[in-house]
Amino acid sequence: MATNISVNLQLIPAEQTTTVLQTKLAVDETPDIIQYNLASAITDLNLERNFEILDNEPWASRIVNKDVLSAAGHVYSFHVSQDTGMQGVVYNKQIFADLGLSIPTSYEQFLAICEKIKASGITPVFMPYKDAWAANIWPAAAFADFVAKNDPTFFDELNSNKKKWSDIPEFKTFLEQQYEVYTKGYTNTDVLSDSYDMAVGKFLNKEVAMMFMGDWLIEGVAQQDPSMELGVFPIPSSDDAKLGASPLGGQLFIPKKAKHLQEAKQFLDFIASKEIAQQIVDSKGYVSNFSDVTTPELPAYKQDIVDNYILPKKTVFTTDAYMLVDRSELYRLLQDQFAGGLTPEEVLKSWDEKFSQLMQDKGVSGF
């Protein structure tokens, strides 16, 4: 499959990526292919205006899970893997086994498990909420699971100003739940002083049993102690909740104004070919997103995710997949709740106001 296409790889410092790409798109100096994450591309890079729809590319018919590559009903991005990262409750399997605990499927069961872990002398849950984004792991999955089952048009109505965050009473409940885990004494004491970079050490030292986080934490622990068995289960905000799927993995996109548009598409064809895709999937330990490419032997925790959640379709995209604006202010409001400054209702009302302003500033219709 010779194409004689040469690739010039340009690496941009992470903190500059968004600004650099926004500038290049604005002045029509676009790269032929960019790597970004789908959820943020919608908000940061004006996805629908600036990027090619890839529905009819030769490889598209072989994709197993188009949702992880799609927005607004179209495939806009490319990746050989369908595993974008899962978010839930990361837990120490050995601690659960030693205490005879099972994965909880309700909030009440979760609290009972926390009580048993606390009684054993181990901190049940580590909350590193000095890093504000970490406080959103619970609500991002809880909100999405609820509306997927009970109000599937919510995000469309939210993004057209027909509904507000505070319109869903259960959202208040989910924020109360996370805070209750803290007030019951099931967490580290200094939740607003402890940071995410402490998490791996907390698990390695068996100081904590659980954390509301993505499965990337498991990889971080495994790199330092491959023998430690961690797993992940859904945020237990509702009965039989689904596992949160992060839309934040890095995908490839082709700008509409790419100077070498056809060559860029040929490059994706090359990566998507059965032989090359298999090589990538094997070397990276990916969950294949092609019907004719085999998923290799995976780490135990990832195989559990595939068997128990991905294959039986027990996952749900977190709220990040539907957000058209920056979420930083929401994270700060969640921090304020843990500082004792805001009630869950006040968090949602304040976020309604900020969200509406951000949508208005962005020029979204209806705001």
Image (spheres, rainbow, N blue to C red):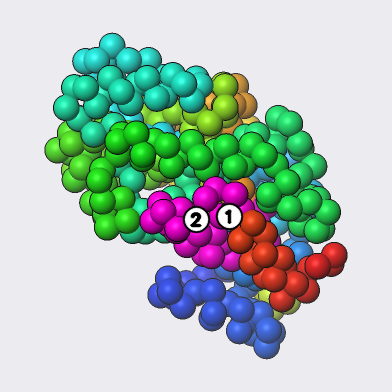
Rendered residue at 68%/84% (across/down): 26
Rendered residue at 42%/24% (across/down): 110
Looking at the rendering, which quadrant does residue 151 occupy?
top right
Mark carried by residue 216: none
The correct choice, above or below, for 355 with respect to 162 in the image is below
Q: How far across and how far down the image is residue 353, in percent?
A: 67, 64
Are the residues flagged by discs 2 and 1 in contact, CB closer than 8 Å?
Answer: yes
Which residue is tagged 2?
A: 342
- Location of the C terminus by quadrant is bottom right
Rendered residue at 62%/26% (across/down): 313
Q: Amino acid at mark 1?
A: Glu
Q: Quick one: 102 or 39, which is closer to the camera? A: 102
Pointer 1 local density, CA inside 10 Å: few below 14, some 14–19, many at least 20: some
Residue 330 is inside the magenta segment? yes
Q: How far across and how far down the image is residue 320, in percent?
A: 59, 52
Q: Main secondary structure of the magenta part?
A: helix
Residue 148 is inside the magenta segment? no
Q: How far across and how far down the image is residue 260, in percent?
A: 68, 74
Where disc 2 sits, the SS reads loop
Q: Quick one: 182 or 199, which is closer to the camera? A: 182
Q: Amino acid at mark 2?
A: Leu
Q: CA distance from mark 2 to mark 1?
A: 6 Å
Residue segment shown in magenta:
322-348
Looking at the rendering, which quadrant does residue 240 occupy?
top right
Which residue is tagged 1?
A: 346
The correct choice, above or below, for 271 with respect to 36 in the image is above
Horizontally, residue 171 falls left or right of residue 110, namely right
